Image (cartoon, helix red, strand yellow):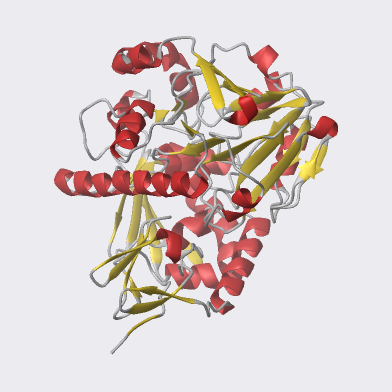
Amino acid sequence: MRITGTGHASMRIDTAAGSILCDPWVNPAYFASWFPFPDNSLLDWETLGDVDYLYVSHLHRDHFDAEHLKRFINKKATVLLPEYPTSQLEDELRALGFTSFLRTKSDEVHELDGGLKVMIQALISPTDGPIGDSSLWVEYDGIRVLNQNDARPADLTRFNELGHVHAHMLQFSGAIWYPMVYELPDNAKTAFGKQKRERQFDRTWRYIDDLKADFVFPIAGPPCFLDDELWQFNDIHGDEGNIFPDQSVFLTEYAKVGGTNAVVQLPGSVTELTDGGTRQTTTHPTPVDEFFANKKAHLEEMRERKRPIIEAEKASWRHPEIDVLKELKKRIEPLLEESLYMAKGVGGPVRFDLVSYDGDEVESIVVDFPGKQVRAYADEKVRYRFRTQRELIEHLIFIDEGDWVNSLFLSCRFSAARIGQYNEFVYAFFKCLSEERLQYAEGWYDEHEKSVDAEDIQFGDWTVQRRCPHLKADLSRFGVLDGNVLTCQLHGWKFDLPSGRCLTGVGHKIRASKEG
């Protein structure tokens, strides 16, 4: 089996029974904020795109690159489609010209031509990607690989049941806006970033230990930030709170926990798995150590080369003809009327401060969840506030974007402030600005609220429900107890066991009791 690195979470898997291209991403994503690093735009995509099968794990734009898929990927390729609750991924791929789909069943092995086997595990909570994320398992001639990309399954038991995995590809770096965009003192921002960076690695080590593959491939990040306004987010400034460590940092941190089986791929690197998957040989277009030793120079060269692309994107955002308040009322108020669980979960007004083109004026608009309306800010106290350029919201309205998380928030082109804890319902709602997504998310939260976890586990003297109240992670695998605080390492959520209160976000009380 041959695995060719094609950048970020993308790879091409070649076997004698067929080839699979996974998550090809080349063009900038999220308002031209994210670029693949290392740069993969100079690869021979005409050849790489001539494949038998295409796998797009989910709709995040650093995995689903519509422009690239349309231009370079063979439209006769069979799409391996995750079992998602909405049809949006299939609809968007059909609009690009793909016509052949294998609609897989989650956790079910599908045998393709020539003995090639695949299984896709779909995650379908409203907080998994844009209503879904997934992992791809592949087996051919006794060699098994798992492309986990940036999915976060509660455990990897299903993959272990199918036999020993030889190559494990998974995310290790950040892919979020926290804590960089928050209006916090620099020392607090660094402290929170350091905690998040450590949690990212802890979660990665747990997944690696669960699967115990022969080889571990760190993938799916980090992106790089080439716009001058975002340049500080690159991990080249000696900031221990930076959440975007690269593969060279992964190697250093992995060695500290005894890891010796990592395989780093640059775009164009080729790994051959032989001897039943127990041996690997990797060739690189550039020596890996040399490449990362010169990371800053690579980024600076790339920044100058990509500057015209960024400027062209920025020039397309302004739509002064749009009455933002009027259009947001038209679009969001009907969804607020239908929202029960998410509106209740947000529990108050959310304020957007829109900065004018010249920066001299600010229009403040409130999405009032209890009042079920969008209106001008009335000088009231709010718990959640976002500040961004007016033209970004104009563009979201202009393109009829139904997912502000997969556009505005991941762009990091905003600042945020909140009073109190993180509230997942805020981001869940702004990911569901369409009838189909809203109805699915409301139904999911309804079922989630009704479900009761009757199984218990022990942490010292504490008896605790086995599944995390947040997203049902197995706390016997991901739970870490420090005093009376239990942390679920899958997403970093913390719980005060004496009270059962969630310390990280709104809601999600845990059931716990102590002997004596």
Residue occupying the point 28% across, 48% down: 182
Residue occupying the point 71% across, 39% down: 92
Left/right placement of residue 53 relative to residue 495 reads right
Which of the two residues, 429 or 14, is positioned nearer the viewer here? 14
Residue occupying the point 34% across, 12% down: 290
Q: Is residue 354 visible?
A: no
Q: Quadrant of the C terminus?
A: bottom left
Residue occupying the point 31% across, 80% down: 499
User: Eyeballing the image, is 295 above or below 117?
Assistant: above
Check the image and name the residue furthest to the front. Answer: 275
Tell me the quarter of the picture where residue 392 sits: top left
Q: Is residue 359 visible?
A: yes
User: Eyeballing the image, is 328 above or below 411?
Assistant: below
Measuring from the top left, give residue 259's x and y in whole percent: 37, 36
Which of the two residues, 378 or 516, is positioned nearer the viewer here? 516
Measuring from the top left, give residue 314's x and y in whole percent: 45, 26
Measuring from the top left, give residue 346's x and y in whole percent: 43, 67
User: Eyeballing the image, is 225 above or below 130?
Assistant: above
Q: Quadrant of the N terminus?
A: top right
